[in-house]
Image (spheres, rainbow, N blue to C red):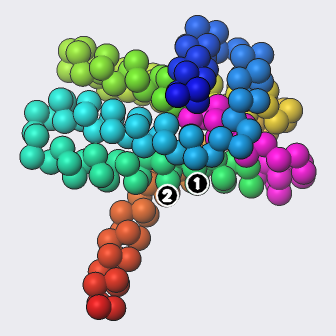
Amino acid sequence: MDFAKQCLDTSLKIIASPTPATFSAEAGKGNKRFSGIVVWLVLFAIYVSIMVTIGTENLLVAPVIAITLSIFIPATVILAVSAANLVYQKVFHHNKYIYDKILYISTAIIVSIQVIALPAILLIPESFKDFLGYAVWVYQFALLSVAFKSISGLKYWQSFITTIIAVFAGIGIWLCLGPFLFSMMSGVASVF
């Protein structure tokens, strides 16, 4: 319960004051919290599946959406942050271990913004949904760049490049995870 309170506190601080000082201060809470972050991402995936179900008004696919997103969202975030950490260490030649901090603050940013944005996107008129969706993605990208810069100590352009690579890695992971899991399931069935 302590970690849940800590996550809520971090989310509220990010919403109230999304500054480099906030990101640096809050990132320290992420050390050795990998399992808690995964639970946070799975709960967020269930929240997203509920919002998608409300938006589509199709209760028959709700369990499938919930299970799929509970695998896809955590895997995508974890592996995209791994790509960012790899770029930080190998391309920009830093040896400091910041994976836990970046994973914690990235999860906090994504969850905080999306928890507010998803209901708003469902409630606004159809003509503004695309604009709000793009605005949310740009805002998250900017926050992730600033957070990565404040935690890692990179220059802004390095942080921007690292964030772009992490986002493209996340998109690639999202697109490849479905076929990969499907091929694994069919491969397991042929073993038995």
Q: Is residue 189 above or below residue 177?
A: below
Of circles 1 and 2, which is in front? 1
**What amino acid is found at the position of numbered circle 2 in the picture?**
Ile
Figure quadrant of residue 90: bottom right
The answer to whether any part of residue 126 appears in the image is yes
Residue that carries the numbered disc 1 in the rendered image: 79
Of the image marks 1 and 2, the number of the one nearer the N terminus:
1
Place of residue 112 in the rendered image (x, y in percent of width and height, measured from the top left): 50, 23
Instruction: Classify residue 86 as left or right of residue 109.
Output: right
Residue that carries the numbered disc 2 in the rendered image: 173
Q: Residue at x 29, y 80 (%)?
A: 186
What kind of secondary structure does the magenta stretch mostly adopt?
Answer: helix
Instruction: Classify residue 105 as left or right of residue 159.
Output: left
Q: Residue at x 58, y 26 (%)?
A: 2
Place of residue 23 in the rendered image (x, y in percent of width and height, measured from the top left): 71, 23
Of residues 11 and 83, the one nearer the viewer is 11
